[in-house]
Amino acid sequence: MTRVPAKLAAAAVIGIVALLGTGAGAVPPAESATALTSMVQSPSAPADAPAVDAATQKCTPDKRALIPGTSYLVGRLGLEEAWALSRGRGVTVAVVDSGVQAGNVHLKDALVPGHTSFGNGSARADADLFGHGTAIAGIIAARQVKGSGVIGIASEAKIMPIRAFEAGPEDGQSSRDLTPPSAGTVAAGIRWAAEHGAQIINVSLSDAQSSAQYRDAVAYANARGSLVIASAGNRKTAAPNQPDPTHFYPGELDGALAVAGVLSDGTWDAESSYAGEHVDIAAPGQAVPSTYISGGDCVFNSDSASSSYATAVVSGAAALIAARFPEESPDQWAFRLMQSAMRVAPAERSNTVGWGEVRPAAALALIDDGMLPGPPSAAHPAPADQPENPRTVSLDPVPDALDPARTIVGWTLGAGATISVIVLLLARGRARRTSA
């Protein structure tokens, strides 16, 4: 959602950049594991699959891992305070991605019917090619289960899986080797989601070209009451030896939010992320616990900040807002997110984190009176500058209406003083004569 004038040049022909929120050599990387294989298919976890601690074990599709303990996101983002106001009930979030595994323990009652946006639509959207879409869905709306600390930002929202990927990576390949979805399949997925009632549409990818298709899809979604939230780009998953992209679709478009990833402590990482005027907001994208194609959990992106996972965090926050303020427009939801984001100076944005790091509770509590510093309000017109009419300042003395009275009083006081002096002198003269 471009909030400042765009100064970006023509698109570089490098296709979709920062397609996934994964580090080089992993699809996707997990805690203690930088290369995961056998993820072309998404088998359901066997009934007797052992539950292991995903924080200390490699995450593999044939072992259902559950992560105990509370995610750091709960404390960092103030989620307990936000959950007192909203859990996302009644909101549907579309995940335009690689599919979402319906059999994950956190997602069994979370999915609504989805769609495949390529071919004849027969490929299943509720099965995940390699795990990315499932991880995104879990960050947004995972239900809490016994033995696991994984819980979505909006745990009562619904997930609409939209599969835009036609193929996953081969064994041992990295995210750089993926065959990305076309702009057409992504745009079609956005449109389908908007037509079928998704209030929030998560697109954890960024494309350097095909602006017209994305622009039309985002405008269509916005007109139907849907907010598109997309990646601002991941440097680590861009094609090697290529210049930086000059466009980041669909996130940079009006009607969409572009999300940058920051490290778990809120630090922006230049080695992981792109900076630019397209960035609207930021969220943690490092060491994110979420749902995995094993049927359980995994910790994703331990070594860098992924805007894919950060995008999911913001989509979850948007779902909380949409549930609490269903009467507001997508632009108003976006305004709440940006206006309430944590930043150093309330009136200033930066090219690294946009308007700051998302703070869901503050967004839910925000009162927009049109006078807040920062991004322009979506509900109130910007106050017009009123030039002052030039005035002629006179330097002539202003007549004093009391001047005659003051003159009389002055003369009276002066006369009195003179008489008093004369009386005193006469008295002194008499005194001298008497003493003589």
Image: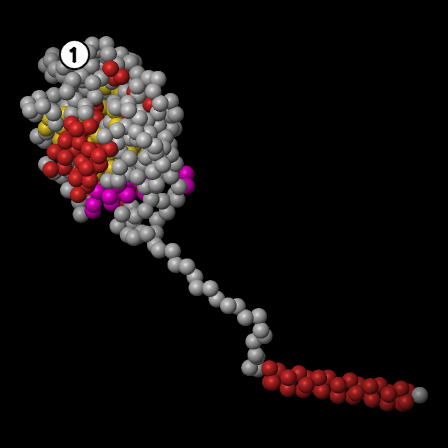
- Residue sitting at 15 percent across and 30 percent down? 189
Q: Where's the N terminus, which quadrant?
A: top left
Q: Is residue 151 in sight in this rendering? A: no
Q: Position of residue 391 (x, y in %)?
A: 48, 66
Dominant secondary structure of the residues highlighted in magenta in the image: helix
Query: Does residue 2 appear to the left or right of 393 in the view shown?
Result: left
Residue 150: x and y, percent? 22, 25
- The residue that appears at 25% across and 24% down in the rendered structure is 16
Q: Secondary structure at mark 1?
A: loop
Along the viewing direction, whichever of 229 and 121 lies nearer the viewer? 121
What amino acid is found at the position of numbered circle 1 in the picture? Answer: Asp
In the figure, is residue 308 to the left or right of 194?
right
Q: Write down the quadrant of residue 66 in the picture.
A: top left
Q: Is residue 262 above or below residue 424?
A: above
| Residue 433 can be seen in this image | yes
Choose between 145 and 134: the one closer to the eye: 134
The residue stretch that appears in magenta: 328-345
The quarter of the picture where the C terminus appears is bottom right
Q: Quadrant of residue 107?
A: top left
At x 26%, y 37%, the residue is 253
